[in-house]
Image (spheres, rainbow, N blue to C red):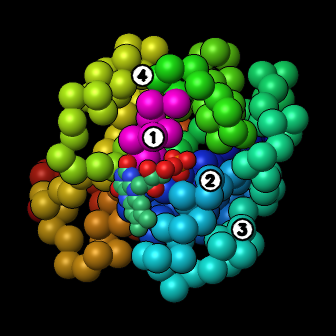
Amino acid sequence: MKRLIIGISGASGVPITIALLKALKNLDDWTSCLVISKGGEKTIEMETDYTVQDVIDLADEVHDIKNIGASIASGTYKTEGMVIVPCSMKTVAGIANGYSDNLLLRAADVVLKERRKLVLVARETPFNTIHLKNMLSLSQMGAIIMPPVQTYYNMPETVQDMIDHITGKILDVFDIDYQNFRRWNPESE
Ligand SMILES: Cc1cc2nc3c(=O)[nH]c(=O)nc-3n(C[C@H](O)[C@H](O)[C@H](O)COP(=O)(O)O)c2cc1C
C-alpha cells in the first residue's frame, strides 16, 4: 500500500483537493493521509458546499493538525510524498524556513529531509517578492511548485474541466493516471 500525505492549508482551491481525494479513494493500492490547517477548514466552509467532515470522509487516514506526534511527523513512516493543495503563502513560508509548528508543516519538513516528493499547489495572486523567494528556495530544495494556473489548450468548458486538469498534473507526479485528464496530443486531432 502506497501512502500519499495530503495537506490542506488556508488558500483558495479546495475543489482541487476534493477531486484529488476522490481519485485516490478509487485506487486500491493508495492510502491518503489527510491533515487540514485551521485556515484550510475555513476555506472548505467558505468556498465549497462541503463540510470539513465531508472532506475528512473522503480520506483514508486523518491526522489532527495539533498532533505533532502523528505517524506522518516521522521519516520512519514510509510515504511516497506529500501534496499541499491548496498551499497558502504562510505555509510556503513555514516550510521554506523550517518553521514546523504544526503537523502539516512538520510532515512537509519530513518529506523534504527524506528527499521524497513534495508538491505545493501554491496559490496567491499576484505574488510578492517574499512569496517568490520562498518558492525559489523550496524549488532549489527539490519541491515541485505547481500553482493552479489555468490552461486553455485543453479547451476547458467547465470549472470542473479546469479542476480536473490540475488534478491530473498533480497525480502525474506520482505516476497515477487520472481518467479525467486530457493530455496534449496534437497527433490525435
Ligand atoms: C476565504 C479565504 C481565502 C484565502 N485565500 C488565500 C490564498 O489564496 N492564498 C494565501 O496565501 N492565503 C489565503 N488566505 C489567507 C490564509 O488563510 C491565512 O494567511 C492563513 O493564516 C494561512 O494559514 P495556514 O497556511 O496555516 O492555513 C485566505 C483566507 C481566506 C479566509
Q: Is mark 2 within 8 Å of ligand 1?
A: yes
Gap between marks 3 and 1 measured at Cα: 22 Å
- Residue 58 belongs to magenta span: no
Label 2 vs 3, first from the N-terminus? 2
Label 2 vs 4, first from the N-terminus? 2
Name the foreground residue: 155 vs 159. 159
| CB under 8 Å between discs 2 and 3 | no
Query: Is residue 79 placed above or below 62 in the rendered structure?
Result: above
Asked whether residue 19 is in view, the answer is: no
Q: What residue type is labelled 2?
A: Ser
| CB under 8 Å between discs 1 and 4 | no
Report which residue position mark 2 lands on: 37
Position of residue 114 in the picture relative to residue 43 (left or right): right
Query: Is residue 42 placed above or below 74 in the rendered structure?
Result: below
Gap between marks 2 and 1 measured at Cα: 11 Å
Q: Any mark on residue 138, and which?
A: 4
Q: Callout 3: 10 Å neighbours few (<14), some, many (20+)?
A: some
Q: Does the residue labelled 1 lie within 8 Å of ligand 1?
A: yes
Label 3 vs 1, first from the N-terminus? 3
Report x, y in % for residue 37: 62, 53
Residue at (60%, 65%) from the top-left corner? Answer: 41
Query: Is residue 76 placed above or below 3 in the rendered structure?
Result: above
Query: Is residue 133 placed above or below 120 in the rendered structure?
Result: above
